[in-house]
Image (spheres, grey):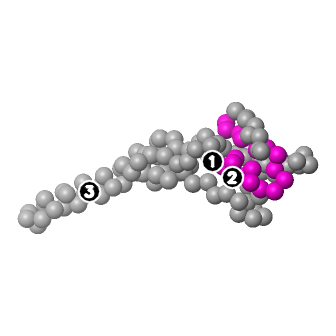
Amino acid sequence: MKQHIGAIIFAVAYLTIQVAVPIWGLRISGQSRFSWKMFVRNEDISNFVVVYKDGSCRSLDELNKATPVAVIINPVDEAKFIPPHLCRLKGVSSVIIRQSTVERLYPCG
């Protein structure tokens, strides 16, 4: 048993680190390296609303349920890349971008 004490100490220390570091990462909001929240979306989620020429509006979530239009993958500047893509849809006049408390209008065409 005495000859294995070093291996036992190493194994216990290794397993402790493997559990303690991810638990410590739970305290941090959003993404944190080496934790169970490594691929969590940021809290500042953009919401997109498509405004059609006839005045009707549909959110990106509603559009994606009918036909997959856009898939948002982190890390991407959503406000920069998604609206031009949505403007290519037939009959779209503008896209409303909502980020936390800010709302911007992206005109199409």
Residue beneath label 1, please? 81
Left or right of 22 on screen, residue 5: left
Question: Separation of disc 2 and disc 1 at Cα?
Answer: 7 Å
**In the rendered structure, does residue 58 fall within the stretch colored magenta?**
no
Q: Position of residue 60 (x, y in %)?
A: 74, 53
* Magenta segment boundaries in residue numbering: 81-100
The secondary structure type at the circle numbered 3 is helix
Name the residue at the top extreme.
Answer: 102
Instruction: Decide if residue 97 is in sight here.
Output: yes
Label number found at residue 51: none
Question: Separation of disc 3 and disc 2 at Cα?
Answer: 48 Å
Viewer-proximal residue among 91 and 60 = 91
Please tell me how crowded label 2 is: few (under 14), some (14-19), or many (20+) other residues with Cα within 10 Å: few
Instruction: Decide if residue 45 is in sight here.
Output: no
Residue at the spot 67% in from the left edge and 57% down from the top edge: 70
Residue beneath label 2, please? 85
Residue beneath label 3, please? 14
Amino acid type at mark 1: Phe
Name the residue at the right extreme.
Answer: 54
Q: Quadrant of the N terminus?
A: bottom left
Question: Separation of disc 3 and disc 1 at Cα?
Answer: 43 Å
